[in-house]
Image: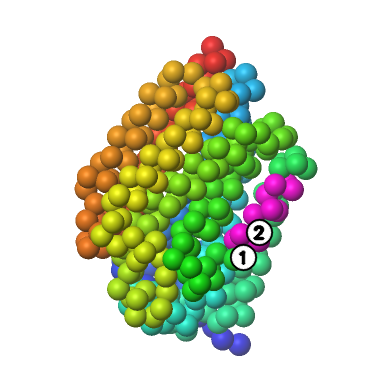
Amino acid sequence: MFKPSGDITVADRAHDWVERFLPRPTRPYARLSRFDRPIGTWLLLLPCWWSTAMATGAAGGGMPSVWFLVLFAIGATSMRGAGCTYNDIVDREYDAQVARSRSRPIPAGQVSVTQAWIFLVAQSLTGLLVLLQFNMFAIIVGLGSLLVVAAYPFMKRITYWPQFVLGLAFNWGALMGWAAVLGELSLAAVLLYIGGILWTLAYDTIYAHQDKEDDVLIGLKSTALKFGEATRTWLIWFFSGAFVFIAAAAYLAGAGAFFYVGLIVAAGHAAWQLRTLDIDNPELCLRLFKSNRDLGLIIFAAFTVDALLKAS
């Protein structure tokens, strides 16, 4: 049976904590799950936390359930890992042609496709165990995301808008948090979901500019290629739309003035990204993409403080 060697490291992560601290046989699996790159987990998790805090405020206020926040953190980690593993299985032939991804575990020969599928199932079962801790309505809502998640890796082959499909998948938590707290869905949760999708279109377009040259060579599509030099204009619309929809969701949920102060701070962060962006600087694009964790945390803090103020 094929056994991962662990001798090949990912090109830009040769000295990170995975290489320093994890046992050699586990390193390829940590990289399949992107445990060494937690930004994706944050971006999947934050809409869950937004919605949980917003629903808590709508229900009368108080501290958002720490139990729910922890469950969502575990679920986001496991399901993001499963999604990355699935994406690497589907994209293994493309990854082998791209300098930044050819050292990933599957194209590098560290993990076989069969082993990757087994690992994917294990991570998915962990996510399922987390999902089963919520009420039945939230469980049904959570299962509804599976089709979108399964479709996403194929979108870059057929449309210049794979970032939109990623937004559909990555912001499902905006529905989940509300459903977990209140056992229902409302327009507020739907508007928050739309705002999250627009946010994803912004940050993942920035991310996609890292790979645009390789994408052209191997025939993959992205919003970065579609927008080109007009990227900044599109990002202005995406970020602006995101804040409008998030503000509308907060209004319907009964958020107070403090929330909107926090949202203005988050908008200032987005403005900094737009002012700083250089689409021909891959390192800067990556740094700006990662900074969206901070933007998302600002919004979560605003929802949380608003809920606490309502209780007091």
Q: Residue at x 73, y 34 (%)?
A: 183
* Image: magenta residue range: 139-150
Q: Are marks 2 and 1 in contact (CB under 8 Å)?
A: yes
The N terminus sits in image quarter: bottom right
Q: Quick check: can you spot residue 207?
A: no
Would you place residue 231 above or below residue 176 in this image?
A: below
**Residue identified by numbered label 1:** 150
Residue placed furthest toward the bottom: 1
Amino acid under label 1? Ala
Which SS does the magenta portion mostly show?
helix
Instruction: Give the label on residue 146, or none.
Output: 2
Spot occupied by residue 302 in the image (x, y as percentages of width and height) = 44, 28
Q: Amino acid at mark 2?
A: Leu
Measured from the top left, where is residue 79 in percent x and y? 58, 57
Q: How many marks?
A: 2
For the C terminus, give its image quadrant.
top right
